[in-house]
Amino acid sequence: MLSKIQLKSIRTLQTKKHRQKYQKFTVEGEKIVREALLECPDRIESIVVTTGQFEKSQFPVPSATTWMETDSRSMASMSTLQTPPGILAVVHMPPAVASDPLDDSWILFLDGVRDPGNLGTILRTADWFGYTAVLLGPGCVDWSNPKVIQASMGSIFRIRCLEMSLEQVRKHCPDHPLFAADMHGEDATRMAWPQKGILMMGNESHGLSPADATHPIHHVRIKKDPGSRAESLNVAMAAGILMQMISERRSMP
């Protein structure tokens, strides 16, 4: 059974401060726990379930992972969801690899994306299109935020989330041209997308932060229907549209 000390320890992971201090985060729900067991079993410290709701034999639990049961009241106190799914896992954060070369063909750079639902959806969409790295610039929501984890639907375990400034991005990816989503940019449907690059998406309300002119940035826009009165697109939706365009154009002979 889960002890009071263990309960308190897991509850602290609801805050960014303690997640960063202990380099751990929690995931909730059968699907996401199974994704964690599939993608990073060696990083799962423990799995906690509501007594009678799940059995250990139902999951491929590594020998080094602790399996614990608890009552529904304790589970509710650890959960960040309105309706606790009855299972959560404590996962160690991956080691920092920001110094490693980023040689992916296409990479996402997010600037000031503060909404956890948007970030989680972007991670899920990036995973769909084969991206393996998402760079989080200043002002972005913490990727280990429970709402980000839930919205990613397990993609968080297949995407490297690295915190970097635009200057660091240029240093680590000097051969990747930069493409920034901009309502006043060139029509994205007319772009000749290269085989590699960095797609830059900005804040939900204010767009990208001003950048210096020492490195060229190609500004691109998603064409708006002439009769549309919408002011803007949701950043996650816009990122998905542009990733689709990039994917299609790169696959053309």
Image (cartoon, grey):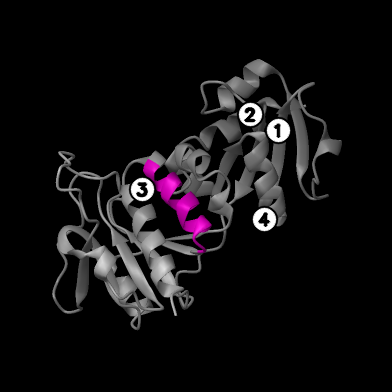
Q: Is residue 44 left or right of residue 197?
A: right
Q: Which residue is mark 3?
A: 236
Q: Earlier in the sequence, mark 4 or mark 2?
A: 2
Whether label 2 touches label 1, CB < 8 Å: no
Determine the residue located farthest toward the bottom in the rendered image: 175
Question: Seen from this angle, which residue lies furthest right?
Answer: 57
Circle 3 — which element? helix
Residue type of the residue flagged with mark 2: Leu
- Distance between mark 2 and mark 3 Cα atoms: 35 Å
Write down the residue under mark 1. 48
Residue 166 at x, y = what percent? 27, 68
Tag 3: residue type? Ala
Q: Which residues, given as a range, are shown in magenta? A: 118-130
Q: How many marks?
A: 4
Distance between mark 4 and mark 3 Cα atoms: 24 Å
Magenta stretch: dominant secondary structure: helix
Mark-to-mark CA distance, 1 and 3:
32 Å
Please give the name of the residue rendered at 79% of the width and 45% of the height, measured from the top-left corner: 61
Determine which quarter of the picture holds residue 53: top right
Residue 141 position, x and y percent, is 36, 46
In this view, the residue in front, 253 or 177, is: 253
Closer mark to the observer between disc 4 and disc 1: 4
Question: Residue 126: within the magenta?
Answer: yes
Q: How far, Cα to Cα, is label 4 from label 1?
A: 19 Å
The mark nearer the N terminus, 2 or 3, is 2
Label 1 or label 3, whichever comes before in sequence order: 1
Magenta segment includes 142: no
Few, some or many residues within 10 Å of mark 3 (<14, 14–19, 20+) = many
Task: State whether residue 125 is above or below residue 117.
Answer: below
Give the amino acid type for the residue marked by disc 4 in the picture. Answer: Glu
Q: Which residue is mark 2?
A: 7
